[in-house]
Image (cartoon, rainbow, N blue to C red):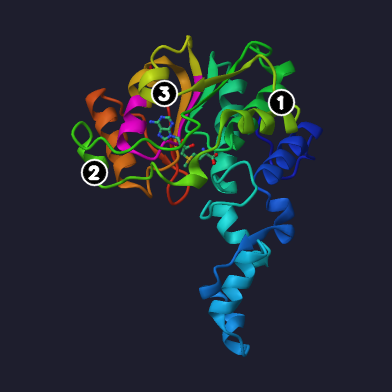
Amino acid sequence: MQQSDSQPRSVRDRYIDLLMSSLTRSLYLDEETHDVPLAEWEGLTSLDLDAEALKQALRSTSTRLTRRGGDPQRRQVGHDWPPTAETMVGIDRLADVRFCVESALADGVPGDLIETGVWRGGVTVLMKGIVEAWASDDQYGGTRRVWVADSFEGLPAPDATNYPADEGIDWSGVEPLKVDVDTVKANFAKFGLLDDRVEFLVGWFSETLAAAPIESLAVLRLDGDLYESTMDALVALEPKVADGGYVLVDDYGGWEPCRKAVDDYRAANNITAPIVEVDWTGIHWRTER
Ligand SMILES: C[S@@+](CC[C@H](N)C(=O)[O-])C[C@H]1O[C@@H](n2cnc3c(N)ncnc32)[C@H](O)[C@@H]1O
């Protein structure tokens, strides 16, 4: 399913290209606006203005200071939390999701696809778009489900007693990470991709993943940041990844608790399949049973 650069791109490839650049907003970066804290606004020093009075005036009129335009480099490598895009995963790692899904489908690897830790849902929207786009050439086309697993209320507080690697990492109050399930469903619907083969697992991974009625997985993607969240997902789901299926980890290179969970799990289960580095943080490996 991969094409060389010299071949003309099919309508299907162009659709997936468009989906990726839309989900990341890389197509509309010039229209993006970013909040600028007054203290960081360089224009302020060149004006004869009372910063405190300006701050009050902005607040009292519900006005925000914004800067136009996103940074293409940061979006490429997934280094920012975009204001409106459906995913914070950069284009390089999305291209890896595409590669792994298309490769698993082309090789007839049986099973569903899942991401654990979806935020606004963009990666799972991409998975669903690829599954639908390739359905007519996929021997399991029309039966594969895409599972969307998240608390839909952000990260759990760290449980340092059971997971010492997470000690001191408390992101449970980080509001931008809390995206409710109806918003994620609406994001699927926006792209015409919400149907009864998209399944939502709402709740903490420790309570939802093991009990989920998933028989087999062609693609398992982990993006829960913490040691606990990564380990819970691996223990519940990695044994269900079929021979030739892919395990993708978003935070391996850039986030020590996640890397430790993956290394601990692979060592405890004698997984020696080579790790492929995708970018500064993402990895995948192909399952050998
Ligand atoms: C970095 S964000 C995921 C980014 C997303 N993959 C994307 O495409 O932009 C991490 C997500 O993991 C979820 N999460 C982390 N730990 C969790 C857990 N133990 N149970 C349920 N959800 C969890 C958070 O709610 C959050 O939505």
Report if the CB atoms under discs 3 and 1 are less than 8 Å apart: no
Secondary structure at badge 1 equals: loop
Q: Nearer the viewer, mark 3 or mark 1?
A: 1
Residues 13 and 189: in front is 189
The reply to whether the magenta stretch includes residue 251 is no
Amino acid type indicated by mark 2? Glu
Q: Earlier in the sequence, mark 3 or mark 1?
A: 1
* Residue 175 % position (x, y): 48, 45
User: Marks 3 and 1, how far apart in space?
Assistant: 28 Å
- Residue bearing the label numbered 1: 193
Is residue 223 inside the magenta stretch?
A: yes
Q: Which residue is mark 2?
A: 167
Relative to residue 66, is residue 139 depicted above or below? above
Whichever of callouts 2 and 3 sits on the residue coming sooner in the sequence is 2
Q: Secondary structure at mark 3?
A: loop
| Residue at image mark 3 | 287
Side of 272 where 194 appears, left or right:
right
Residue lying at 71% horizontally and 36% vertically, measured from the top left: 16
The kind of residue tagged 1 is Leu
Give the side of residue 208 with respect to residue 28, left or right. left
Q: Residue at x 22, y 38 (%)?
A: 160
What range is drawn magenta here? 218-232
How far apart in space, not on screen, are marks 2 and 3 (Cα)?
A: 31 Å
Residue 45, numbered label: none
